[in-house]
Image: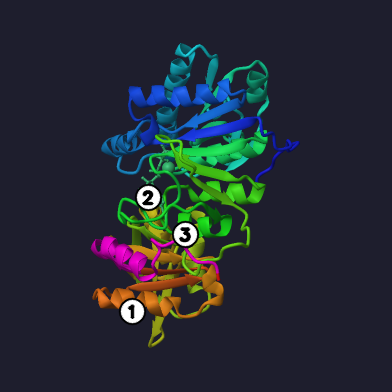
Amino acid sequence: MWRVTNLPAHRPERVVMKFGGSSVADPEKIKNVARQIAAAHERGLEVVGTVSAMGKTTDSLIALAHDVSPDPNGRELDMLLSTGERIACALVAMAIHDLGHVAVSLTGSQAGILTDSSHTKAKITEIRATRIEAALAEGKIVLVAGFQGFSRETMDVTTLGRGGTDATAVALAAALGAACEIYSDVPGVFTADPRIVPDARKLLAISYEEMLEMSASGAKVLMLRSVELARNHGVRIHARSTFSDEPGTWIQENTGMEQPIVSAVTHNESEVVFTLSGIPDRPGAAATVFDAAAAAAVNVDTIIQNVVHGVAELSFSVPAEDVPATRGAIDVATAALGTMEIEENHDLGKVSLIGAGMRSHPGVAAKMFRTLADLDINLEMISTSPIKISCMIERGDIPRAVRALHAAFELEREPVAE
Ligand code: ADP
Ligand code: ASP
Ligand code: MG
């Protein structure tokens, strides 16, 4: 659990404004972000900005690392990746100076963002905001490099995982008692990825609970960890567009007003399924595999086990970036359990339905499976939670599956109150 020392009261005159990579992709866009931050300051707000690396910088840096090394060292990868956000942050600060405001850019460690020491997926443990507070007290605009922190245990720079600037923004808002505005290239959270479903509808509000499931199942508009932090600290997030003034989506406690059966369809095309066969069918075999995965910090998602004639077969999905760590974990498990047959499938994707109303409405799964069957799509794996149903299917089928489910559940229509 994340610690906030002397949690400040909510201060409506303070705002944390987060801009993603596409919002700072080139010099003109950087100047636009600077104008928006300066405008908030001119309205009398204390402003802390946090930005992601420009455009696809992080992807390029990761590719560069892999050109140099097949399995880059985690500490060095974080040293490398954290530079992307520092560049963007310093450039925004320069552009703000040109607008006649005083701005100061800070790295994650200068800003007092402390994390655990798990490289490339560190968790924020505490924010020591004294330096930010001092700069705000002097009337300065503060820019914090997103996606990064500092481990006091190892004295090293860490990064927070893909999309991590969302977590920086929410954690800063909690620590500073500020409002939290997350600006990106979409005007809010939609009933499906608007790049795939043209008539996807923007949601005015969504509960933390549903947003957690959406983020966990692939809706990258908000990073999962940022929603967890928001829920744990009661931060209302306003997810909105960098390029227009229209109101976005509020991510907040459930108001209890509207509980659609299905709120959204999500998809994920970057998971890999591992299948281990020939596992001895005895107590502790699965524990051995998943202990090894946990020790390697692998985020395991869907799991299926079959037992035939005293031998077990275990399939599970992991995010693409965890594949090398998973292979290492399987080596450890093999040493304990004996030789197993190992298969990796990189051709599957996951489509999910999310809705808090599912709890009390049977029949959603049947309708989902029927819709996919009508498209002749085979279900490779199925997993459920009280408010989510997920199916692993051929990756190439994902776009038409998402569109068909969106249409079958009529998500383009405003829900009618029951
Ligand atoms: P940023 O760079 O600002 O952090 P991201 O690229 O991380 O932005 O997230 C925004 C993207 O999330 C959008 O371009 C959109 O394609 C995608 N997305 C996926 N699912 C959804 C959804 N349900 N609602 C809105 N956007 C979504
Ligand atoms: N630049 C990082 C990424 O691409 C962090 C972020 O965008 O929030 O994942
Ligand atoms: Mg993002």
Residue furthest toward the right? 6
The reply, left or right, for residue 385 in relation to residue 269 is right
Numbered disc in front, either 1 or 3: 1
The reply, left or right, for residue 396 in relation to residue 119 is left
Percent of width and height locating residue 160: 49, 41
Circle 2 packing at 10 Å, graded few (<14), some (14-19), many (20+), is: some
Percent of width and height locating residue 400: 26, 64
Q: Which mark is residue 206?
A: none
Task: Tell me the quarter of the picture where residue 72 sits.
Answer: top left
Residue drawn at x 54%, y 43% as measured from the top left: 238
Along the line of sight, the residue nearer the viewer: 258 or 185: 258
Along the line of sight, the residue nearer the viewer: 405 or 316: 405
Q: Which mark is residue 293?
A: 3
Q: Which residue is mark 2?
A: 321
Q: Earlier in the sequence, mark 1 or mark 3?
A: 3
Residue drawn at x 60%, y 39% as measured from the top left: 171
Along the line of sight, the residue nearer the viewer: 362 or 276: 362
Residue type, numbered disc 3: Ala
Q: Of helix, strand and loop, which one carries label 2?
A: helix
Image color mode: rainbow
Task: Tell me the quarter of the picture where residue 178 sits.
Answer: top right
- Mark pair 2, 3: CA separation: 13 Å
Circle 3 packing at 10 Å, graded few (<14), some (14-19), many (20+), is: many
Image: magenta residue range: 392-417
Residue type, numbered disc 2: Glu
Q: Which mark is residue 370?
A: 1
Q: Earlier in the sequence, mark 2 or mark 3?
A: 3
Q: Earlier in the sequence, mark 2 or mark 1?
A: 2
Residue type, numbered disc 1: Arg
Whether residues under marks 2 and 3 lie with C-beta atoms below 8 angstroms apart, the answer is no
- Where is ligand 2, by quadrant? top left
- Mark pair 1, 3: CA separation: 34 Å
